[in-house]
């Protein structure tokens, strides 16, 4: 989550947590982090962590760099603040669709990305899992994910990003323990285990 959004719309963060999503830091103001000084980078992390903690009661162990902009300096600062850097390798580019806050990318193009991922997997072209990137920026992006998630789940074993790294405790508060095999959407912050029949793991990152 973007920290300033959590402060402005706390109920959205509460719902995400209560619905079982893994909550990660996405900085306070969504800047290109490598352009920030050390002190500015710390502030981006700190105030976001504080907003998430005050809203949901948990302190995340992960963060996603805005635009994927990160270097060893920023990665080290994040690590010192208890944050594991999460990047992706499949980008839906859904944020660029026509909608408030979006751009002019055709929804059909985004559909094509999802369809291509599925086709590659069904053709046996995939040899490892992937981290995909979608957004909850507006109704268009949310609807796109809700349309394609069930289709992805039929082909891939969709799990949270941190589960790919065998992380069962995504927060510094130790009472929250998650199974390694769980659905990315529709779960809960409990220890119930779910599974899928597909063999290739993928994870969906919503931000």
Image: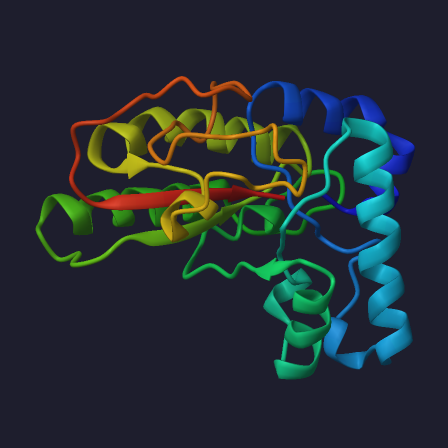
Residue 157 on image: x %, y %: 26, 36
Visual colour scheme: rainbow
Q: Position of residue 120 (x, y in %)?
A: 18, 51
Query: Which residue is found at the position 26% from the left and 25% from the top?
Result: 195
Left or right side of 23 for 123: left
Give whichever of 138, 57 is nearer the camera: 57
Instruction: Where is residue 173? Give x, y as percent.
Output: 67, 36
Q: Name the residue rendered at 20%, 45% in the picture.
A: 200
- Residue 198's image quarter? top left
Furthest residue in direction left, as rendered: 124
User: Which one is nearer the viewer's eye here, 34 or 62?
Assistant: 62
Q: Is residue 48 left or right of residue 126?
A: right
Q: Quadrant of residue 41?
A: bottom right
User: Could you tell whether 147 is left or right of 28 in the image?
Assistant: left
Q: Is residue 14 visible?
A: yes
Q: Quadrant of the N terminus?
A: top right
């Amino acid at each position: 989550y973007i920290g300033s959004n959590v402060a402005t719309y706390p109920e959205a963060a509460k719902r995400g947590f209560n619905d079982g999503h893994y909550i990660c830091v996405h900085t306070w103001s969504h800047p290109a982090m490598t352009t920030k000084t050390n002190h500015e980078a710390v502030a981006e992390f700190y105030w976001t962590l504080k907003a998430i903690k005050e809203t949901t009661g948990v302190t995340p162990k992960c963060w996603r760099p805005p635009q994927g902009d990160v270097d060893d300096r920023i990665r080290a600062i994040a690590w010192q603040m208890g944050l594991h850097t999460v990047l992706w390798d499949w980008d839906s580019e859904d944020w660029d669709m026509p909608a408030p806050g979006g751009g002019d990318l055709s929804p059909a193009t985004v559909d094509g990305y999802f369809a291509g991922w599925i086709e590659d997997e069904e053709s046996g072209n995939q040899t490892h899992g992937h981290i995909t990137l979608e957004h909850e920026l507006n109704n268009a992006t949310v609807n796109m994910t809700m349309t394609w998630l069930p289709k992805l789940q039929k082909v891939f074993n969709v799990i949270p990003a941190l589960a790919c790294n065998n992380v069962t405790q995504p927060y510094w508060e130790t009472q929250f323990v998650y199974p390694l095999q769980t659905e990315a959407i529709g779960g809960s912050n409990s220890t119930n285990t779910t599974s899928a029949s597909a063999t290739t793991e993928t994870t969906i990152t919503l931000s």
